[in-house]
Image (cartoon, grey):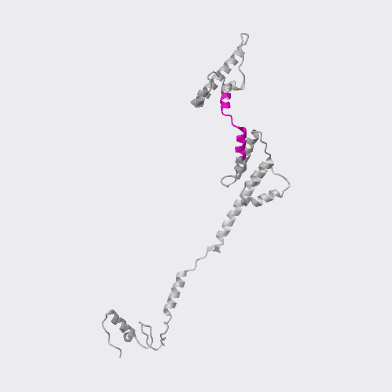
């Protein structure tokens, strides 16, 4: 539709000696200029339209006037981008490839503002921003004589991240299988059985101060004493009297 014709070419000059082709080109340019002005005025907020002079009839000049009202301070923008670049840390919430490419994008913006940052510096900044478990990876790079490009750094970092994930999975598997023996979970010892056995043993122990019955002697089921039965036990008679129970015949 040649809507950008007014931005790509200057306005043709028409005279009485102009040919029909030149007049058609002028008509195309005028149409492109009018359509561009109409689109811009409908797209921007009214508060901005009121601040721009209506006497500007060229779409190119109209856009330039808007641009001048939104000029940023290059020094301030450089400071913001440098602060962002230096403070970036990889937190493993995303993909390490995307993370390094984001750092490279910030460097590209700084270069557009005429702030030159070398690829070697970017590589070092990226390595410094990696978490502590990449320590062996950093040492390996520092021990090499060759320097990596950004693409090589991305490739090696992706490989290292995948290796660390595999090691982590294997460690979890080993920790899980170490709790089993022969693929079968060990049963925890039943402490209740030990407790019952201890109680039973304690109950079967004879009380101190009381005689142990021989195999042919009677045993009192009240005081566990030997040599007499329950109905002849003096302790049993005393207990019945304390409870108000009828008195039993005394032992003969």
The residue stretch that appears in magenta:
64-82
Q: Position of residue 105 (x, y in %)?
A: 62, 38
Q: Main secondary structure of the magenta part?
A: helix
What percent of the width, then of the height, locates residue 172?
Answer: 57, 56
Q: Residue furthest right?
A: 145
Instruction: Inspect this view and state whether residue 233 appears.
Output: no
Image quadrant assignment for residue 238: bottom left
How many circles with numbers are drawn on the protein?
0
Which quadrant would the N terminus be assigned to in this image? top right
Which quarter of the figure has residue 24?
A: top right
Residue most extreme to the bottom:
252
> What is the x, y in percent for residue 114?
66, 33
Q: Is residue 143 above or below residue 67?
A: below
Question: Residue 118 at x, y = what percent?
Answer: 69, 39
Q: Is residue 91 magenta?
A: no
* Residue occupying image coordinates x 58% and y 59%: 174
Whether residue 242 appears in this view of the structure is: yes
Tell whether 120 sits left or right of 72. right
Of 109 and 79, the residue lying toward us: 79
Residue 181 left/right relative to 114? left
Locate residue 126: give its quadrant.
Answer: top right
Q: Residue furthest top?
A: 16
Q: Quadrant of the C terminus?
A: bottom left
């Amino acid at each position: 539709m040649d809507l950008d014709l007014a931005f790509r070419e200057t306005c043709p000059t028409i005279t009485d000696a102009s040919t029909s082709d030149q007049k058609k080109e002028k008509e195309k340019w005028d149409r492109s200029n009018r359509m561009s002005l109409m689109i811009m005025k409908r797209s921007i907020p009214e508060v901005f339209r009121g601040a721009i002079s209506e006497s500007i009839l060229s779409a190119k000049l109209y856009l330039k006037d808007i641009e001048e009202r939104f000029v940023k301070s290059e020094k301030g923008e450089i400071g913001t981008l440098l602060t962002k670049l230096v403070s970036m840390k990889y937190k493993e919430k995303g993909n390490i490839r995307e993370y390094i490419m984001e750092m490279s994008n910030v460097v590209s913006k700084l270069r557009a503002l005429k702030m030159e940052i070398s690829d070697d510096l970017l590589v070092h900044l990226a390595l410094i921003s990696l978490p502590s478990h990449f320590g062996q990876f950093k040492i390996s790079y520092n021990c090499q004589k060759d320097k990596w490009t950004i693409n090589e750094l991305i490739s090696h970092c992706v490989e290292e991240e995948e290796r660390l994930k595999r090691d982590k999975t294997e460690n979890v598997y080993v920790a899980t299988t170490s709790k089993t023996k022969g693929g079968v979970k060990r049963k925890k010892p039943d402490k209740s059985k030990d407790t019952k056995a201890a109680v039973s043993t304690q109950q079967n122990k004879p009380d101190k101060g009381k005689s142990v019955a021989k195999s042919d002697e009677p045993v009192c089921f009240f005081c566990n004493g030997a040599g007499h039965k329950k109905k002849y036990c003096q302790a049993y008679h005393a207990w019945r009297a304390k409870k108000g129970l009828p008195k039993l015949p005394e032992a003969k």
